[in-house]
Image: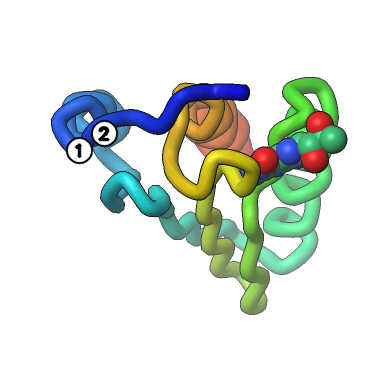
Amino acid sequence: MADLLTADAVREELGRLPDWSGDPTAIGRTAQLGSFPAAIAVVDRVATVAEELDHHPDIDIRWRTLTFRCVTHSAGGVTHRDIELARQIDDIVRSAA
Ligand SMILES: C[C@H](O)[C@H](O)[C@H]1CNC2=NC(N)=NC(=O)C2=N1
């Protein structure tokens, strides 16, 4: 089971994830896509990566705005698994329509 990151570690990781914010309890970001279908296509690609990582984000879908929240539920806070998932989400959003 992954270890919880300290507040300093989370702060350091967020320094490399400029679109994300949060604290040791969870990290999150929003993403504005160009259309609802484009947002859903991003969610579908994130779902594939989440399955590959066996690590799943909370996703809020509101028309073209996606809100991702990552926390390791089994650890009750942020672990390196959330940081890796956040990086993967950024890659998908960056390459989206
Ligand atoms: C059995 C399976 O590996 C676990 O339930 C995984 C699935 N995806 C998960 N996702 C997240 N965010 N936290 C978890 O603790 C978690 N656990």
For the residues bearing labels 1 and 2, Cβ distance under 8 angstroms: yes
Q: Is mark 2 within 8 Å of ligand 1?
A: no
In the depicted view, which residue is nearer to us: 37 or 60?
60
Q: Residue 6: where, in percent of width, then height?
A: 25, 32
Which is nearer the eye, 13 or 6?
6
Type of amino acid under label 1? Ala
Residue 8 seen anywhere in this rendered image of the structure: yes
Where on the picture, by quarter, is residue 19? Answer: top left
Q: Residue at x 63, y 69 (%)?
A: 60
Q: Is mark 1 within 8 Å of ligand 1?
A: no
Mark 1 element type: helix
The crowding category of the residue bearing disc 1, from other C-alpha atoms within 10 Å (few below 14, some 14 to 19, many at least 20), is some
Q: Residue at x 69, y 57 (%)?
A: 39
Please state if 54 lies on the left or on the right of 92 as rendered: right
Relative side of 30 to 97, left or right: left
Image vertical order of residue 88 relative to residue 21, above or below: above
Locate the C terminus and report the quarter of the image it occupies.
top right
55 sits left or right of 1 in the view = right
Mark 1 vs mark 2, foreground winner is 1
**Residue 7: mark:** 1
Using the image as rendered, state which of residue 21 and residue 36 is in the foreground: 21
Residue 75 location, quadrant = top right
In the picture, which quadrant includes the N terminus? Answer: top right
Figure check: 71 above or below 79: below
User: Is label 2 in a helix, a strand or a loop?
Assistant: helix
Tell me what residue is drawn at x 46 percent, y 30 percent: 79
Q: Is residue 34 above or below residue 92?
A: below
> What amino acid type should be assigned to the residue bearing mark 2?
Val
Question: How far from the left and from the top, in percent, is residue 41?
Answer: 79, 48
Provide residue 35's location: percent of width, then percent of height: 67, 65
Residue pointed to by mark 2: 10
Whole-number angstrom distance, CA of label 1 to CA of label 2:
5 Å
